[in-house]
Amino acid sequence: MTSRVPEILDAWRMVAASREFEGRVPLRALTRLRGGLLDDDGEVRFVITFGTDALRVPFVLLQIEAELPLECQRSLQRFLLPVHLQQRLGLIRDEADEAALPPEYEALLVPADGMLRPTELVEDELILALPVVPVSPEAEMVEREFAPTVEEVAKASPFAALVGLKKE
């Protein structure tokens, strides 16, 4: 991570000061995300902005850009998934406060000590952005019909054994 982004931030002090941080982190440093990636080559660029909105709701705005190396499940080839995220997280002290957040906010429960780890916030958003089944946009669609053979249909029939008995 660049020196401009501290490892741990006091969320409430950052909101009061309306602070903004810009950083980069290598994919290999995001240990929870690595399990969903083909390899860990590359980096993530992000901007984290703290503030309050017109309704005095404290928030953190995450802007994240990355290219995630994934394995296409059609071609089994490596491809880079471009990720451009912008997420506004409403900072809450208690789970009951979530209902008071505007609809465009996602809730972020701040620990009792008020400390947040910026890289964990970025990593959480990237994990949520991973597709369930990664497919490269360049991969060809498989548009074949694989009709079962006569033997396969006969074996799959629940009455196939009865047909054999009937012949005897």
Image (tube, helix red, strand yellow):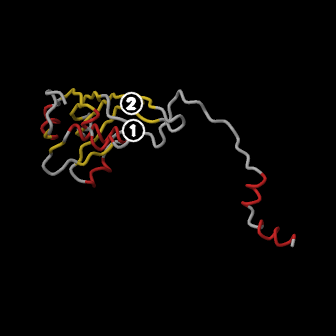
Extreme-right residue of the structure = 167
Residue at figure coordinates x 27%, y 29% from the top left = 46
Percent across and percent down for residue 119 are 23, 37
Disc 1 marks a residue whose amino acid type is Ala
Disc 2 marks a residue whose amino acid type is Val
Q: Viewed as shown, does residue 35 lie left or right of 47?
A: right
Which residue is disc 2 drawn over? 83
Q: Residues within 10 Å of mark 1 (few under 14, many from 20)?
A: some
Percent across and percent down for residue 126 are 34, 38
- Element type at mark 1: helix
Where the N terminus falls, by quadrant? top left
Where the C terminus falls, by quadrant? bottom right
Q: Nearer the viewer, residue 145 or 51?
A: 145
Residue 35 location, quadrant: top left
Q: Nearer the viewer, residue 159 or 9?
A: 159
Which residue is disc 1 drawn over? 129
